[in-house]
Amino acid sequence: MSDLQQRVFDYLAAHQQSALDRLFAYLRMPSISAHGTGMQQVADFLVAELQRMGMQAQLIASAGWPFVYARRDDQPGAPTVLLYGHYDVQPADPLELWQSPPFEPTIRDGKIYARGAGDNKGQHFAQLLALEALLAVNGSLPCNVIVLLEGEEEVGSPHIAEFVAQHRELLNADLVVTADGPQHESGRPALMFGVRGVASFELRARGASRDLHSGNFGGVAPNPIWTLVHLLATMRSPDGRITIDGFNEPVLPPTPAVAAALAALPLDLEAQLAAIGLTPQTLDAPADRDYYARLSSYPTFTINGLHGGYGGPGSKTVLPAEAVVKCDMRLVPDQTVEQVLAAVEAHVQRHAPQVEFIPLGGMDPSQTPLESRFTEPLRAALAAGQRREPLLVPAMGGSLPEYIWTKVLGVPAFVTPYANHDEANHAPNENIEVELFLAGIRSGVAMMIELGRLRAAG
Ligand SMILES: [Zn+2]
């Protein structure tokens, strides 16, 4: 461990209570983007905090809530890291299920309970306290740092792509690091390199102008549910292959590095499946895919719901007039939302032109190469800060707007969760373990120091 790192870790160990007090002050301020509650006050609070820490900080207006922007360029020639987070939180209801009030942070059994404790205030505030500790001990930061905190993540980040495209010159970073999400259930920290994308759509089939008697009109009027069932059957085969022309073309097999990283992730398959009432024999097709590859290396086609006709008790001999199916697809590199939705639309046009295709948008996938020059410094930093070796996770199964960084900004992007796996984000009794919050601050410190060492390598 470097001398500077040791000195800053000692400083942190001596200032734990004040770190907690500062976080608590932040958590007491509601900032619910869905309702517009407290947003401007919290944005102003963050700018004042960042300025007090010694960062050049300001609010930058957007078409929605302002972005908190701060930077410090202490090390010409060293990498510039952009630390992303979001200062908005989910609504707190249902309030009656909270054991302590959501905006009165409370420690129970080593966990801080409050709305935003894990998602995302506790995590990005740990990064900010890391900057503060480095500045307090050393007077400068070991690498260049940009802080960008968004106020609309919990409502789907409607303005961030436009914001990033418009302010490229302010966001001239070499990499982006996001501390968000829960750690692996094994308790190991993780460094994540990508996310699957998502594309959603709806298919609508119509028959007669109204619901009909299945005896008086059966055999005369077409059934829109059958129309959708037949169409869907042309889109995915029973052995699990997606059979939409053009859908699979950009999908590449996992690289050797990705395959090796996936194989190294800890897994108790039986227990994992038992928790959701499945066994290895009842896995989705195709059968020959490993667990983590299923979640990160392959696209999916999910029928979210198929609706039409009668579903109540007993029978009703109705011939429905309309049927709707809602679907989503999880995408992998190098698919795009645009390409996938165009392939689906062309497929529908070819197989059932009377069916209406309604695209519902999505989010592109993102993949940072595991061979990135930033992988080793970030791995080493997490190992030092968390005091456990991090898992290297090629891609998460879910979707985050990481493409903003890798595709719009064009730089490698990493996600590292600082919260416990049971943080209850978006739910009542959201929490972060005190120890993991403190480990997050140490991780941030080590990250800046390790990235600063890349100077010589350019
Ligand atoms: Zn969230």
Image (spheres, rainbow, N blue to C red):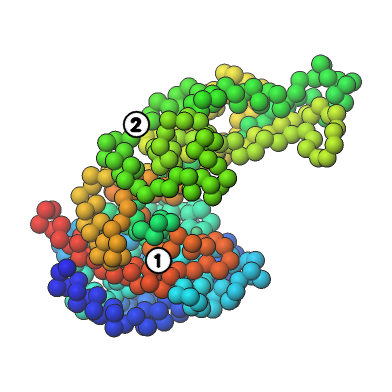
The amino acid marked with disc number 2 is: Pro
The answer to whether residue 456 is visible is: yes
- Local secondary structure at mark 1: helix
| Residue 458 location (% of width, % of height) | 13, 53
Residue found at x 48% / y 58%: 153
Q: Residue at x 24, y 52 (%)?
A: 375
Residue 51 x %, y %: 33, 76
Mark 1 vs 2, N-terminal side:
1
Q: Nearer the viewer, mark 1 or mark 2?
A: 2
Q: Residue 114 at what x, y percent from top left?
A: 52, 72
The residue wearing badge 2 is 253
Could you say which quadrant of the image residue 331 lies in? top left
Residue type marked 1:
Gln
Is 68 placed above or below 416 here? below
310 displayed left or right of 280: right
Residue depicted at 40% across the width and 25% down the height: 249
Q: Residue at x 49, y 69 (%)?
A: 431
Real-space Cα distance between discs 1 and 2? 34 Å
Residue 237, by quadrant, is: top right
Q: Is mark 2 within 8 Å of ligand 1?
A: no
Q: Residues within 10 Å of mark 2 (few under 14, many from 20)?
A: few
Q: Position of residue 426 (x, y in %)?
A: 54, 61
Of 428 and 206, the residue lying toward us: 428
Q: Is residue 279 above or below residue 391?
A: above
Say which mark, if any, is on residue 123. Answer: 1
Q: On the picture, is 427 further left or further right than 195?
A: right
Mark 1 touches mark 2? (CB < 8 Å): no
Q: Residue farthest to the left?
A: 456
Quarter of the image for residue 418 reads bottom left
Q: How busy is the neighbourhood of tag 1: few (under 14 within 10 Å), some, or many (20 plus)?
A: many
Q: How many marks?
A: 2
